[in-house]
């Protein structure tokens, strides 16, 4: 037997390698074709299974998932709704549907399934949901998700910080303040400043222990000034005078200094001195919102001292100066005047802001009863449309739309707004009662009973619910 040469051995190895590689490729191609065939069979089989077992929710869920992957959105929703109904509205099935939509990046489609069940979502899924809501600019729903996430942690960063910032952006100063106050020992300098600012804007009502904690943690001069401004609103004049004496020769924050000096002088009935200090503070201030507060304080000074001429003159000047201001600044002026008891003047600026920025939630809510009393339904409709176009899941927008349809006795039309209000309003209560009554009027007692039951369970007045449906 002749020995095999090295060249023959190499040719043999090459042949075997080529053969094996070809065989593997053939197997892989056959496998791919088989998988495609299996998928096609799976779709056909599911249709056959649904025909044989129409009451099995699993088959409908799988059909829905396939339709969703194929971008057949309406068809998928129909399959999913059938699966949920056949499962007896099981939470597991509802969450599974929401997960399908969310995993495909279809945030809006996922909301009816996930939002009522936030307590059952893990933190990773909640974070994915709120990021999607942020991209879609659905801020009301995002605020709810952040509140749920924030309630699960004792840490300020990053969720509760985000929550506080969004609450401030949306004008929910109460939520912003309460969120930041929970973490007085964790706040950074910016958050501490925001807490004292929001408290000052709301009338100076922070917990003294929180203020003391912030003063101790942040020796910065601005924190001291903001703490002193809150103390002035609480009439703690001993603290204010001590602070003014300490800062009298400092060159820092002269606008704050003059404002504090004016508030202290006004409280002590030194009107001329207070006016002089308010005017100096206005000249030094560069921040529009601080100027609003100073102007509101100056108007109050003239009004409370009986100087009608100067009060009227100041009011006319405010109307002229802020006529073309940013609508958010106009709303802020309205807030400050309203907080000082000047409801008529506040409504003037809310009306101006609403004309400049249709759909403003704060302005529309403030003017709501006046608009309803005057039967200015077109203005209401136009502004509700603008508000819900901007944020279709807005708690305020859906609640006002529900109220509008209820007063118009449009029971059928209020249902979608009422349902949104129960989902997107934190601690919603009255919308359940409204929905229950509307469904009674529409001869749908079983659905009404469900909403009435939730209303009572959440602490609603059982006497407002028909006895037969409690």
Image (cartoon, rainbow, N blue to C red):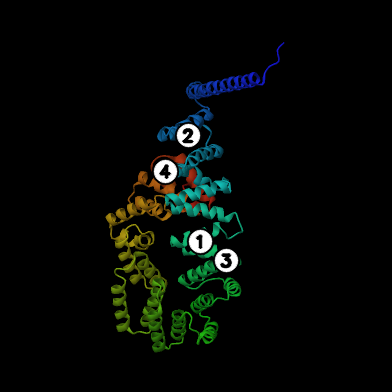
Query: Alpha-carbon distance for marks 3 and 1?
Result: 11 Å
Query: Alpha-carbon distance for marks 4 and 1?
Result: 40 Å
Give the quadrant of the N terminus.
top right
* Residue 187 marker: 3
Q: Is residue 82 visible?
A: no
Q: How many C-alpha atoms fall within 10 Å of the one at disc 2: few (<14), some, or many (≥20)?
A: many
Q: Earlier in the sequence, mark 3 or mark 2?
A: 2
Q: Earlier in the sequence, mark 4 or mark 3?
A: 3
Are circles 4 and 2 on residues that touch, CB within 8 Å? no
Q: How many C-alpha atoms fall within 10 Å of the one at disc 4: few (<14), some, or many (≥20)?
A: some
Q: Earlier in the sequence, mark 4 or mark 1?
A: 1
The residue at which mark 2 appears reads as 80
Q: Position of residue 228 (x, y in %)?
A: 52, 78
Q: Is residue 253 above or below residue 362?
A: below
Q: Position of residue 219 (x, y in %)?
A: 58, 76
Which label lies toward us, 4 or 2?
A: 2
Query: Mark 4 falls on what kind of element?
Result: helix
């Amino acid at each position: 037997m002749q020995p095999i040469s090295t060249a023959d051995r190499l040719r043999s190895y090459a042949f075997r390698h080529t053969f094996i590689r070809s065989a593997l490729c053939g197997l892989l191609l056959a496998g791919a074709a088989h998988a495609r065939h299996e998928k096609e069979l799976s779709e056909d089989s599911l249709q056959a299974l649904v025909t044989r077992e129409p009451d099995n929710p699993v088959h409908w869920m799988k059909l829905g998932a396939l339709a969703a992957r194929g971008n057949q959105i309406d068809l998928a929703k129909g399959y999913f709704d059938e699966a949920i109904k056949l499962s007896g509205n099981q939470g597991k099935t509802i969450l599974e549907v929401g997960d399908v939509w969310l995993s495909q990046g279809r945030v809006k489609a996922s909301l009816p399934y996930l939002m009522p069940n936030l307590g059952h979502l893990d933190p990773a899924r909640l974070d994915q949901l709120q990021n999607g809501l942020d991209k879609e600019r659905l801020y009301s729903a995002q605020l709810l998700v952040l509140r749920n996430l924030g309630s699960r942690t004792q840490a300020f960063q990053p969720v509760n910080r985000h929550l506080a910032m969004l609450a401030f952006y949306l004008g929910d100063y109460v939520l912003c303040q309460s969120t930041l106050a929970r973490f007085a020992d964790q706040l950074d300098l910016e958050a501490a400043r925001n807490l004292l600012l929001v408290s000052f804007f709301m009338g100076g009502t922070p917990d003294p222990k929180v203020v003391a904690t912030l003063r101790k943690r942040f020796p910065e001069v601005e924190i001291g000034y903001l703490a002193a401004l809150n103390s002035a609103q609480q009439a703690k004049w001993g603290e204010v005078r001590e602070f003014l004496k300490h800062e009298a020769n400092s060159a820092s924050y002269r606008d704050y200094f003059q404002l504090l000096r004016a508030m202290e002088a006004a409280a002590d009935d030194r009107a001329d001195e207070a006016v002089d200090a308010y005017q100096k503070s206005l000249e030094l201030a560069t921040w529009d919102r601080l100027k609003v507060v100073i102007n509101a304080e100056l108007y109050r000074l003239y009004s409370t001292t009986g100087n009608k001429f100067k009060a009227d003159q100041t009011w006319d000047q405010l109307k002229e100066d802020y006529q073309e201001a940013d609508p958010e600044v106009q709303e802020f002026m309205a807030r400050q005047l309203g907080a000082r008891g000047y409801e008529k003047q506040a409504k003037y600026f809310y009306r101006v802001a609403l004309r400049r920025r249709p759909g403003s939630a704060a302005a529309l809510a403030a003017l709501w009863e006046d608009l309803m009393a005057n039967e200015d339904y077109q203005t209401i409709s136009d502004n509700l449309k603008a508000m819900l176009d901007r944020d279709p899941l807005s708690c305020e927008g859906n609640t006002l739309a529900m109220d509008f349809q209820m007063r118009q006795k449009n029971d059928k039309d209020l249902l979608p707004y009422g349902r949104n209000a129960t989902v997107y309003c934190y601690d919603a209560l009255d919308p359940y009662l409204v929905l229950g009554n509307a469904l009674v009027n529409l001869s749908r007692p079983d659905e009404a009973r469900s909403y009435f039951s939730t209303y009572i369970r959440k602490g609603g007045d059982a006497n407002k619910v028909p006895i037969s449906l409690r």
